[in-house]
Amino acid sequence: MANKQQADPTLAEQDLLVLAAQSGNRRAFAALFKLHHRSLLRFATKFSRDPELARDAVQDAWLGMTRALPGLHDPRAFRSWLYRRVRWRLLDAMRASQREPLQAAADDSAGNATDAEDNTQRRQQQQTEDHNQLQYALAQLPLIDRQAIELFYLQQLQINEIAIVLEIPTGTVKSRLNRARKQLRALLADV
């Protein structure tokens, strides 16, 4: 039971980690890093479509956060505050490199299936095709809508946290999620 709590701390435990990290506790900071780093990398990579740019942005956000953490007044806001810092770093890096997020293309490597392909291989291929179609449809969405979908479904942030990250009202987050879902349904119906 203790191992599960260490691997997945409750919100109250996360708040305590933030408070400890604010007071200079390196172990608490390391625990926060371990807890959030992977999901931040996934978030950044999805938007930039450039793993190297994503790693740099996340690293810059963590470095900047070490200096700014003492100024965070509400430990509950830590997660959305951290995602917003990564988003800012990504936008700055993308502007600096004169790049827009790349459109994800469907993977052409469907493979050369033989007649002897078994059900497992066919299911895996169908899952890959479904995944590629979804990625392609997501890439067709405007960046802000993709970000809302990513934060809500993949990063599992709450509506109010997404509003903080994207710096828009909660009602706008809801409408963007609704619009993005409708666009995805239409795009996937056409495929």
Image (cartoon, rainbow, N blue to C red):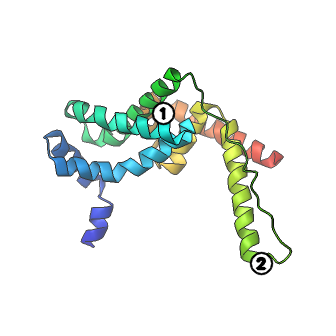
Residue in the foreground of this view, choosing between 107 and 169: 107
Q: Give the mark nearer the N terminus: 1 vs 2.
A: 2
Residue at 47% x, 48% y: name it: 155
Q: Which mark is residue 123?
A: none
Three-letter amino acid code at the position of disc 2: Asp
User: For this view, does 122 lie left or right of residue 57?
Assistant: right
Please state if 140 lies on the left or on the right of 53 as rendered. Answer: right
The picture places residue 28, in percent across and down from the top left corner, at 20, 50
Classify mark 2: helix, strand or loop: loop
Q: Name the residue located 47 percent from the left edge and 27 percent from the top edge.
A: 93
- Residue contact at pointers 1 and 2, CB within 8 angstroms: no
Residue 82, quarter of the rendered image? top left
What residue did someone put label 1 on? 170
User: With 190 as the anchor, is 74 left or right in this view?
Assistant: left
Q: Which amino acid is tagged 1?
A: Thr
Residue 136: quadrant of the picture: top right
Residue furthest to the right = 115
Q: Is residue 33 above or below residue 176?
A: below
User: Left or right: 118 with respect to 71?
Assistant: right
Q: Position of residue 27 (x, y in %)?
A: 18, 52
- Residue 141 visible from this viewpoint: yes
Query: Few, some or many C-alpha atoms within 10 Å of disc 2 (few <14, some 14-19, many ≥20)?
Result: few
Q: Position of residue 36 (x, y in %)?
A: 36, 49
The residue singled out by tag 2 in the image is 118
Secondary element at tag 1: helix
Q: Position of residue 164 (x, y in %)?
A: 41, 32
In whole angstroms, how far apart are the C-alphas of marks 1 and 2? 48 Å
Answer whether residue 157 is visible to the viewer in this image: no
Up-down: is 121 above or below 186? below
